């Protein structure tokens, strides 16, 4: 089993940065993968970024590529989402998700989810 706890959300002005954290507890190994999704009010959950646990594969959605970075801290068993040049369109609840399979862009590929953290970007 895996537990995921996100933190780091908040209210920021457009153009600023924010870093989200996801503490991962439970069984992890080289086949494990973690992703970030987001869901804005009235919209479907959207893929943001994903990486395999060992970092050999990293994926980003087109809207965030070049602005967001997904990374991992081995010592803290955490995965981060560094978000730069934030835009009002990035406003959403951000979720950390995990799978024991290959990472994908569909939420159905992930069986483990955190509770979400709110990110609000003002113009």
Image (cartoon, grey):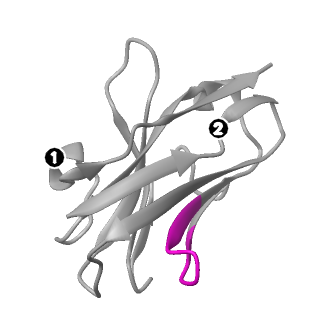
Numbered circle sitting on residue 9: 2
Q: Position of residue 36 (x, y in %)?
A: 43, 51
Q: At numbered mark 1, what does the secondary structure look like: helix, strand or loop?
A: helix
Q: At numbered mark 2, what does the secondary structure look like: helix, strand or loop?
A: loop
Q: Which residues are magenta?
A: 71-80
Task: Tell me the crowding category of disc 1: few under 14, some 14 to 19, or many 20 or more residues within 10 angstroms, Cα based.
Answer: few
In this view, 16 is above or below 54: above
Q: What residue appears at the point 31 percent right and 25 percent down from the top-left corner?
A: 44
Residue 61 seen anywhere in this rendered image of the structure = no
Which is the main secondary structure of the residues drawn in magenta? strand
Q: Is 22 on the left-hand or right-hand side of 96?
A: right
Residue 78 on the magenta span: yes
- Please name whichever residue, 62 or 69, is drawn nearer the observer in this view of the structure: 69
Q: Is 9 on the left-hand or right-hand side of 5?
A: right
Q: Is 4 on the left-hand or right-hand side of 123?
A: left
Q: Nearer the viewer, mark 2 or mark 1?
A: 2
Distance between the alpha carbons at the discs numbered 2 and 1: 24 Å
Q: In what quadrant of the picture does the N terminus appear? A: bottom left
Disc 1: which residue: 108
In this view, 20 is above or below 26: above
Instruction: Evaluate if marks 2 and 1 touch, with contact meaning CB atoms under 8 Å apart.
Output: no
In this view, 17 is above or below 102: above
Residue 83 seen anywhere in this rendered image of the structure = yes
Q: Position of residue 113 (x, y in %)?
A: 30, 47
Q: Position of residue 46 (x, y in %)?
A: 37, 37
* Corner quadrant of residue 49: bottom left
Task: Tell me the crowding category of disc 2: few under 14, some 14 to 19, or many 20 or more residues within 10 angstroms, Cα based.
Answer: some
Q: What residue appears at the point 54 percent right and 43 percent down from the top-left corner?
A: 63
Q: What residue appears at the point 45 percent right and 50 percent down from the top-left corner?
A: 5
Q: Is 2 on the left-hand or right-hand side of 14?
A: left
């Amino acid at each position: 089993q895996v537990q995921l706890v996100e933190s780091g959300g908040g209210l920021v002005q457009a153009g600023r940065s924010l870093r989200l954290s996801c503490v991962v507890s439970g069984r992890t190994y080289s086949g494990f993968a973690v992703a970030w999704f987001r869901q804005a009010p009235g919209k479907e959950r959207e893929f943001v970024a994903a990486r395999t646990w060992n970092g050999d594969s990293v994926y980003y959605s087109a809207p965030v590529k070049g602005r967001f970075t997904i990374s991992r801290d081995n010592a803290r068993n955490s995965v981060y989402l560094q978000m730069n040049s934030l835009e009002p369109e990035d406003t959403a609840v951000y979720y950390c998700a995990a799978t024991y399979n290959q990472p994908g862009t569909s939420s159905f590929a992930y069986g483990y989810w955190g509770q979400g953290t709110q990110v609000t970007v003002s113009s």
